[in-house]
Image (cartoon, coloured by chain):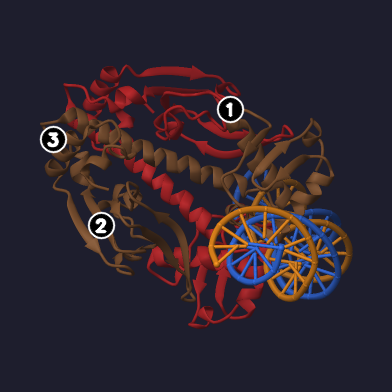
Chain colours: A red, B brown, C blue, D orange
Amino acid sequence: MDFIGLSKTALFRGATPREVEAMLSCLGAQARQFSKGEMLCRTGDVVTALGVVLSGSVLIENDDLWGSTTVLDSVGPGQIFAETYACASGEPLMVNVVAAEPTEVLFLNVDRVLRVCSHACDHHSKLIRNLLSISAQKNLNLSRKIFHTAPKSIRGRLLSYLSYQAVRSGSRSFAIPFNRQQLADYLNVDRSALSNELSKMQKEGLLKVDRNQFELLGARQQMEF
Amino acid sequence: MDFIGLSKTALFRGATPREVEAMLSCLGAQARQFSKGEMLCRTGDVVTALGVVLSGSVLIENDDLWGSTTVLDSVGPGQIFAETYACASGEPLMVNVVAAEPTEVLFLNVDRVLRVCSHACDHHSKLIRNLLSISAQKNLNLSRKIFHTAPKSIRGRLLSYLSYQAVRSGSRSFAIPFNRQQLADYLNVDRSALSNELSKMQKEGLLKVDRNQFELLGARQQMEF
DNA sequence: ATCTGTATGTTGTCAAAACAACAAAAGGAG
DNA sequence: CTCCTTTTGTTGTTTTGACAACATACAGAT
């Protein structure tokens, strides 16, 4: 990803490549290279800049009390990371950011992004709107995950998640973006138990499943369980 | 809460009462009254304005598939609501907003907030920074909740939550802002099971508890479980 | 002090889900 | 096609936590 490609990302959407380049110099953006495994930020750090992945990818990881590492997210070209911490001034990181491969990252100081400069105010304010939109979007994603993992039973979680997917797709029949293991992780349940529950629900006539293709059936789904 | 009070809120922090008043007229803010039980927004609505509670309070509620209602949050004077949906343009609400009592609310069109006007740009951009900061902060709160409810066992959740509280307070001894029931709700577990687990952990010497006062003990907490 | 309501702790039962181990199906690569 | 890998489904066992019911402790009011 070069500066031209940036104009297609969520953060710079709406700006032309020329404008992107102008903004970057105006903002004093710093590009840096990282080799595989190198740590860009670590738990406890207080960051003031957000990162834009230009090429390669970074992993957002957490080390628990017992030393084992969990990958929370993977961030690829055009996507940003650490923006939440940079925007909530002063909050120390609860995660590590590690290069998953040779990676080039652009760092943007959030204060300078938010301090509207006298020139180019219109693109600049578009950038700010994009940043806010990204943050709000992330917010909704997190809320939804909490929402779908709130029911105590696997069936409850599945119905919550699948109902939402049906509404979102505007149809009782839809595909989900997860395989079984990923869905189990998302809903915070055991994969085999998830498979099992789906089988049961299918036998009870609540839905039809084939791989990641689902169909919710009948009004009975409001009554059962 | 009047316009003077607004200057002490998270959204308007940094602006004087005079400046707040100037901004409000510049932004075309609309104040409205609601009587108890009145619905301000409902599931499925697409909103373009955020709400600031001036007096009274509103409840953020969810109606599940079976018609029962869950209160997700309560928003009081000086706090804002619906800002996430208003900022993530086009996302329909997944919740209802209901007046819990006679309530006065100020609605701010987010587009106008984000469209920097020619006058008063400095306060205006402070407002935008505040909004982004609120969003980022909310983001971190949601992430933390997801994080602390990720472990499958009650003990795991407790250790995750308590460790964080210890780090945040900078001491092994600290108070938490929840009673048992609230903590159980936050960690998504049964209250009595939570009490029980705390007892066990205390017997095992992992910690000391008295009401909402906690003390994490020794290095053993890294080894056990 | 007593009464009352609320918060917290304790115990036992039971259903649900984690876990483990395996079988079956799907999808590629040669 | 076969071989290999990955994904998904099935079954049985074991652990866990939800739930109910109750006991105890605490705080406020009278």
Q: Quadrant of residue A203?
A: bottom right
The chain carrying label 3 is: B
In the depicted structure, whether residue A29 falls above or below residue B217: above
| Label 2, label 1: how far apart the Cα atoms are | 42 Å
| Label 1, label 3: how far apart the Cα atoms are | 39 Å
Crowding around mark 3 (Cα neighbors within 10 Å: few <14, some 14 to 19, many 20+) is some
Any mark on residue B104, and which?
A: 2
Look at discs 2 and 3 and give the one toward the viewer: 2
Taking B222 as reference, is A32 left or right?
left
The residue that appears at 40% across and 33% down in the rendered structure is A78
Q: Is residue A15 visible?
A: no
Look at discs 2 and 1 and give the one toward the viewer: 2
Q: Is residue B5 visible?
A: yes
The chain carrying label 2 is: B
Q: How many marks?
A: 3
Could you confirm whether marks 2 and 3 are on the same chain?
yes
Kind of residue at disc 1 = Thr
Q: Which residue is mark 1?
A: A43
Disc 1 secondary structure class: loop
In the depicted structure, whether residue A183 falls above or below residue A202: above
Taking A198 as reference, is C9 left or right?
right
Kind of residue at disc 3 = Cys
